[in-house]
Image: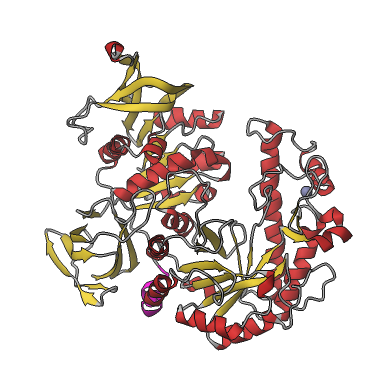
Amino acid sequence: MAWWTTNRMRLIQNNLRESDANLDVERSIEELKKLSANVWMINAGGIVAFYPTQLEYHYRAAGQQKDLLAEAVEKAHANGIKLMARFDFSKAHEDVFHRRPEWFYRTREGREVNYHGIVHTCINGAYQREYALHIVDEVISTYEVDGIFFNMFGYQTRDYSGRHYGICFCDSCRVRFREYSGLALPDSESPDDPVYRQYKQFQETTTKEMLDRIHALVKSRRDDIAISTYNENKVDIVRKESNTDIHRPHPVWLYSASENVQSVEDSWDDKCVSNCSINAIDLVHRFTGVSEHEIQIRLKESLASGSGLDFCIIGVFDDYPDRANLPAVADIYRFHRENESWYGRFQSMSGIALIKPGVTQQSAMKEYFGVYKMLKEEHLLFDVIHQHTLAEAGERLSAYKAVLIPGITHFSEKELRVLGQAQHQGACLLGTGGAFTGDEAGRRFLEASFGLTYQSVHDYRQEAVYFHTADKKLFRRFPDRDWIFLDGPYYRAAAGALTVRQLPMVEPATYGPPERAFGHRLSEQAEGAWLQDVGNRKAVYVPWHAGELYYKHGYADHKHVLLDLLEHVAGEPCILKTNAPPQIELFFHRLDDTTLILHLLNLSGFNGVTYGIPIPVYGIEVALKGLGPVREVMELTKQSKVNFCSADGTSTIQVEAVADFAAIVIKL
Ligand SMILES: [Zn+2]
């Protein structure tokens, strides 16, 4: 069995600078041991070679006095630590550019991008396609590395200052795109341009092709070398990042690590995920870390979602000017080391599937994040099924009570078949925010599976429009709130005779001055939700962006309306109930037939922007229904027993207090 498949990595990455080429390996290993790391990632090659390369166009670190890679591999292994070699082929030293200019990225005007002496390469040029493989081969043939990681794999169009240069116009790109499509490179970068859409597919195909070539080479040399990058194709360890950027618009995404891990862990059986917690505030300010409490949340979310641990700093620990987060990192890494037998093999206990938009559906991400947040806050157990795996999800998808499709407008024929099949076998489909409206195939599906004929979209901006929660039995979270506000797109459709129309639209009226804020009336043509429950076709459609509105503004109405609809059609989709507040993030998995694991993470230290010490939460009860009698409950974090009581087929776990994090094993 390959070493990474135990899924128990405690990875530390030193993102080396050229000036670290003579680093003191022994001191680094001492730091790694203090942190309980079992995997060390350091730079090997690409932009700078950190070993005595024999390759003519591989720039070696200036002033390097030793074979760093050889020493790192030897000493890491002597201490039971795996070594992963990092490569970055997205750029190369300007010396190489002067000798082989045809390998490099070109703007539309034919100019290269030289950023502080490092020049952008192109994935279609011979450097990335061929020479990079020689570099990888040299490293894996010379050194006993345990894994290789590629940074910035694929198409890069920005420099480190964030400046956008547009797509590459080098000769290789021109020729290869013409071979692929018969066309010249696109004039625009607009998703509305059919040539650009084809170019995006070309990017995906060529990126995959490159990963195929790397995979073939590496596995032909040694099949116990893990391949890792941010892509999924032919990759053993999918790398993700929880990071920040001071120019990133708010809201701050509290569930970054959970979502990063879930979207791989729940979707692929043959891959593991390593979610790197980037200590630096952003790419500009690499030497100051984010809050210790943010680091804690990221690492604990990773662990509790079914992954290992992964943490990165720039350079080496010796002269790193921010040591503040290291004790917190050491604590959680030590916890994992001491309890690792419980980790790495989580199985799903979820009754709900949430489909994550694929790479061509990025406009649906806010809708997806909003729905994700709702489910988390409500403690509903759900799996994330990445759209990239949907076509193969078949039987698996049919086992869920509800399948949530947040705003994904385009699906392949095969994906639609899988969704239709799940519905036929009893799963309720819940589509929101324009799902399925992108093309003819989707609209046919909408008609067949939801009983809806799509008509048009109208964007409500600055219009006083609402939905009326008239049916108080269904909308039980709205005893005293009758209207929900709408902002943004509304997807008009004609509902079939068997479709139940809910949430009648309160049509726009004047809203100012106050003397003129009247005149609303209930629409007879437009509603905020359509329900169908005919034979084996259970479906709900919410033709507006409830998820995105919740993600952006956080008003509970938009969450409550979806939760009421979900409960109405799917009953109680979970075997678990709790009195924990939304500020407790809950994770629940099966380990084997008689062992379950529950994690409670206290997020109360987060106020929307700043992370601080969480406020302890007392008296949390978690009721588990229909799992059989509980024999014993242990809290790993405190090494103590936890009280529980059983009655009427329900066992209730009583957790006295959660200061910040509780990991609880339940034996049946
Ligand atoms: Zn190019």
How far from the left and from the top, in percent, is residue 260?
47, 56
- Outermost bottom residue: 78
Q: Is residue 440 left or right of residue 428?
A: right
Residue 659 visible? The answer is yes
- Does residue 344 belong to the magenta stretch? yes
Tell whether 386 sits left or right of 645.
Answer: right
Magenta highlight on residue 289: no
Is residue 187 found left or right of 575 in the rendered image? right
Q: Nearer the viewer, residue 28 or 454?
A: 28
Is 153 placed above or below 516 here? Answer: below
The figure's colour scheme reads: secondary structure
**Eyeballing the image, is 448 above or below 337?**
above
Q: Residue furthest left?
A: 647
Residue 134: quadrant of the picture: bottom right
In terms of depth relative to the viewer, which is nearer, 415 or 189?
A: 189
The residue sitting at 41% across, 34% down in the picture is: 432
Q: Residue at x 80, y 37 (%)?
A: 182
Magenta range: 336-345
> Residue visible at 32% across and 30% down?
531
Q: Is residue 30 left or right of residue 616?
A: right
Query: Of 274 and 109, which appears nearest the observer?
Result: 109
Q: Quadrant of residue 504?
A: top left
Q: Position of residue 295 (x, y in %)?
A: 42, 63
Residue 660 falls in image quadrant:
bottom left
Chief secondary structure of the magenta span?
Answer: helix
